[in-house]
Amino acid sequence: MGGETLAQQARLQRLEHFKQLYYQAEHDSLKARIALDISDIYLDIQLDSAERYAIIAIRHASKANHYSHLGKANNFVGICYLNRARLMTALEFFQAAYEAYDRGGDKTGVSKMLNNLGVIYSETSNYPKAIEIYKKAFVQDSALGNWEQASYALHNIAINCSSSERYDEAMFYAQKLKHYAHQLDSKLSVNMVFGEIFFQLGQLDSAQYYMEMAVQDIERAQDVGYTTSGKLTLADIYLQQGKLTPCSQLLAEVEQLIVLHDLPDKRLEWLRIQSDYFERSGQPEMALNSLRAYQALSDSLDAINQLERLNEINAKFEKDNIERLVVEQDLMLKQNRSQLILIILISLLLLLICGAILYAFYKKRALNGVLKKQNEKIQQQRQKIISSINYAKKIQQSTLPSEDDFESIFDEAFIYFKPKDIISGDFYSYQQMGTKTYIAAIDCTGHGVPGAFMSLIANAKLNKVVNEQGIVDPAQILVHLHREIRNALNQDGDINENMQDGVEMSICAIDNANHSIAFAGAGSNIMIQTENGLIEYKGQLPGLGGNLIGDNIQVETAHIPYKKGEVLFLFSDGYYDQIGGKQGKKLNKKKFREILTRVTEIGLSYGKLTCDAYISEWKMFEPQTDDMMVIGIRL
C-alpha cells in the first residue's frame, strides 16, 4: 500500500508541475505538448480528464499547424472513446489522427493509427477490413524497422484470421510472429495467439496450455486491457472444460481489474462468461441475473453509440440546412392553392415511385437468395479445389530440403521463398559432397499448378543426374539435366505445345578449403558482394529443355575465387520483375542490387525479413506476378 501511495503522490506532483507549465507557456505548440503530457498521465486513471486535456491539445495544435501534436491528441481522444466502448466516435478521431500524421509526413504515426483503426474494425466484427488494415501496418512498420509495432500487426492479423475462421492463415501468421520473436521487441505474447486459434478450433487442451503461458507473459507486460482479455479467454476455456473452480477464480480477478480501470466492454464479456458459469454450476437464478445484467449493459452501450451518432447527424443537418429550411417555410406560406395541389400530386408521384422501388427491392432480395445459394455451391467447390492444392503444397514442400538445416551449414545464410500461388515453379536444392557444398536455384516454366509439376520433374531429374549418375561438375550437371528434361517432356520429336517448357538454373559448388566457387548457369546468374561492390556472373546457357539449344552443348564451369566474408546470392527473376511503385513498373535489376547490398549491410539473419518488407512495400496493392526466390550465403 505504501508503494501505491508514493506512486500516486508522484503522479499528482507531475500533474501539478505540468499544469503550472501549461499556464506559463506562451506558444500554442508548447501548450499542446504539455496538454498531451497531462492527458497521457490521466489515460490510466481518469478518462474524462484525459479526454478534456487531449481536446485542449487539439485546439492548440490546430492553431500552431503542428501535425504531430494534432495526430497524437486525436489519438488520445479516440482511445478514451474506445475504452468507453463508443466505437464509432473512436473511429472518427482515429481517422482524424491518421490524416494529421499523414499530412505531417510522420510514417511511424500513420502506422500506429493503422493499428488503432484495425482495432475498431475488429471490435465491430469486420474482420476482412481489419486484416487488410493490419497488413498495411505490418508492411510499413517492417520497412521502417519498427519491430515492436510490426509484432502488434502480426499478432492482430493472426487473431482476426482466427475469428473469421481462416485458421490456416491464422496459424501461418502466428508461426511468422514466433519465427521473428527474437527480432520483434514486443510486449505481446505469441502464446495468446496460439491459444485463441486452438480455442476457436475447439481444441481445448491445447488452448489451455498456450493461454496459461500467455497469461504469465501478459502479466509481465503490464497492459491492463490485454491482461483482461487473456484472462477472460482462459476463464472461458476452463468453463468449456468443466473446470469451474479455476474459472471462478479468474472471473474474480478480472472483476477487480474491470472495476479498478472502468472497462465496460470487458465487463460485457465478463457477464456473459459469468452467466454460463452460474448455469453450469447449478445456480440458475444467479445465471439469469448475470444474463439480465449482460443484456442491460449491451443495450446501454448500443443506445449510447446510436444516440451519439444521431446527435452528430442532427447537429450537422441543422448547421448545414437551417437557413434553407427558413426560406422554404416562408415560401410555403406564400404559395397559392394551385401550388399546394402541385405539391400533393408530386407527393403522390413520389409514393408511386417509392412503391415501385419497394417492389424492386423485394424482387431483388428474392433473386439475391437464389444467387446466395449458387455462391454457396461455388464456394464449396472452390474450397475443395483449395484443399486439393494445399495438399499438393504439402507434397511439394516435402521434396524441398529444410531451410533451418540449410542455414545451419553456414555461419550466415537465408532463403527467401515466396510462391505466387499456393504451390510454386521455383525450388532450391543443396547437398554436401566431400569438401564441397552444392547449391542450386531453379526456376521452372510457369507457376502455380503447371509450374509445380515442372518443378517435381526437374527435381527428380536433378537427383538422378547427381546421385544416380554421379555427375559432380556444375557445367556437366546442366548438360545432363537438359537432356533428361527433353526426354521426360518428349521434346526430341516434332514441334509441339511443350517445346517451350524448360528450366532456368544456377548451380554453385562452394569449396571452402580452396576459397573457390565452381559456377554454371542456364538463363540464370549469380552475384557476389565483395569489398569492391556487387559483381554479377552470367550463366553460359539460355536455359535447359525446349528447343533453345540442341543436345550437343559446349559449356565449361567457371571457377571464381573468393575472400572470406564475401556474400554469394542466387535468385530467380520473379523478385526484380515484380510490378509496383508509383508508376506501375518492374522493380528492375538496379534496385535489386541495392536491396542485396542493403541485406549485406544489415546482416543475413535479417535477409528474409528485409526482402519481404521491401517487396511488400514496392508492390502494395499490385498482385504478385511470379514466384520469388533469393538465397544468400556468407562465404
Image: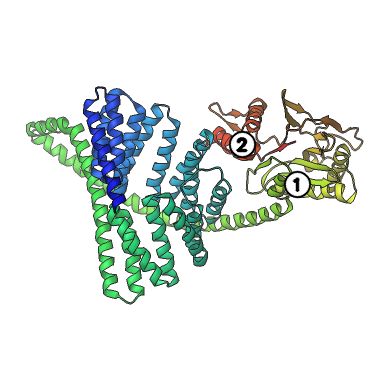
Residue occupying image coordinates x 24% and y 55%: 300
Q: Is mark 1 on a helix, strand or loop?
A: helix
Relative vertical location of residue 399 with respect to residue 572 in this rendering, above or below: below
C-alpha gap between disc 2 and disc 1: 26 Å
Residue occupying image coordinates x 65% and y 57%: 391
Say whether residue 425 is left or right of residue 226. right
Q: Quadrant of the C terminus?
A: top right
Q: Is mark 2 on a helix, strand or loop?
A: helix
Q: Where is residue 522 in the image (x, y as percent from the top left)?
A: 80, 35
Residue occupying image coordinates x 57% and y 48%: 176
Q: Position of residue 414 (x, y in %)?
A: 67, 41
Disc 1 residue type (three-letter)? Met
| Residue 454: numbered disc | 1
Closer to the camera in the image, 131 or 494:
131
Q: Nearer the viewer, mark 2 or mark 1?
A: 2
Whether residues under marks 2 and 1 lie with C-beta atoms below 8 angstroms apart, the answer is no
Q: Where is residue 456 in the image (x, y as percent from the top left)?
A: 76, 50
Closer to the camera in the image, 392 or 609:
609
